[in-house]
Image (spheres, rainbow, N blue to C red):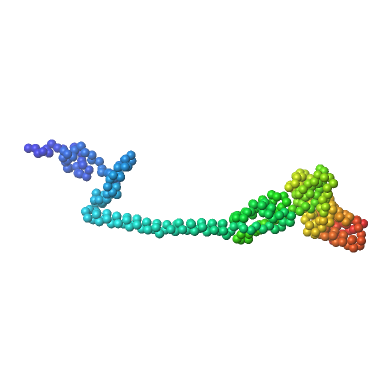
Amino acid sequence: MEGPNDGYRPESSGKRAGESSGQGIRDWQKNTWFGPAPQNSNPFDEPEDAPELRESRSENVNQRMGDFWQPQHLTGQNAVNEIRENSRKRNRNSGNQKEKRRKLSPVFWIVPVVLIAILLILRFAVFTVRDIQVTGNKNIPASEIIRISGVRNGDSILTLDEKTVGQRIASDYRLQFKYMIRELPQTVVLTVREREECCWLTYCGITYVMDKNRMVMREEEDPGFQPKDLVEVKGLEVRSNTMVGQEIVLGNEKQQEILSSLFLHMKVLGCTGEIKEADISNTESILLETRDGYTVSLGDMEDLHAKLRSMLLVRDELHTMQKTGGTINVSKPDTPIYAP
């Protein structure tokens, strides 16, 4: 007599996961999936196209709270106690973080505000230009030089760029910039030098008045115009730039060097006004003519200071001897020669 399970062949049937091959299965267990159970998977997760379903669930599901989500070794009251302890820790950590934020937030706000306030005070109240002074000027008013410099009351004295100020001042051909001094906290001193007219030349029927660096200070078209107390320069090889506010370019570099050096030493010795004419057509034999009628031979440009000083001493001696006119050769300044 056969039992209800007679005729069943367990070895030919599928096996449930975790069961041995010798055990049979009942009818209600047939036609089911026997693959391995998913690991670390949340059966309540929804597809990406339906995340709104998560919001309608209990927090126990979303946060995996309750007996279902507990490890196997935590069951019953132990699991509940563990959940409560974890919840208290989370709440405690959250409270500590909020407390830290409350304690630190004033520092994060106060320090930047204080720094900004200090910088604004230093910029607009302390280190601000209130007094601008000009030194070295003679004919050009200080107010005009300040206007040209671009320095204004209210500017930050710390951020003033000396190079930029110098370029602005030098853009006026009448001025040369020397340096700028900051007298903290509020005073700026601009030191300049006015270009001085010291010589003139006639070129293409026009008289050009220059300084010692060949800067054209003014021009006159009257052929009879001869500036008083200025030295007429002859023999210059003019190349270009015969315009007011520009330096005359010479074709002979040696002449450029002689012209600057000669008038520098004459200014130092204070005898520029006593020289009527300077002929530097021959750079190896420079000739001067004084206003009292002496012709002075300087030779080349070596030891110009000593030669000019020798010329002044010899001329003073000739005046004592009541001799006028003649030639003074100071090419060797230690042994000057006079010829009536």
Residue farthest to the left, as pictured: 1
Q: Residue at x 79, y 54 (%)?
A: 263
**Residue at 83% in and 52% down:** 228
Q: Looking at the picture, how far across and down is residue 148, in whole percent?
A: 67, 51
Q: Can see residue 173?
A: yes
Q: Can the viewer see residue 167?
A: no
Locate residue 199 relative to residue 18 in the image: left or right: right
- What residue is drawn where x is 48% and y is 57%? 113
Left or right of 285 in this view: 340: right
**Count of numbered circles in the view:** 0
The quadrant in which the N terminus is found is top left
Residue 303 on image: x %, y %: 80, 57
Residue 37 falls in image quadrant: top left
How far from the left and from the top, in percent, is residue 258? 79, 52
Which image quadrant is residue 81 in? Answer: bottom left
* 15 or 220, nearer to the observer: 220
Quadrant including the C terminus: bottom right
Pinpoint residue 133: horizontal percent, then vertical percent: 67, 58
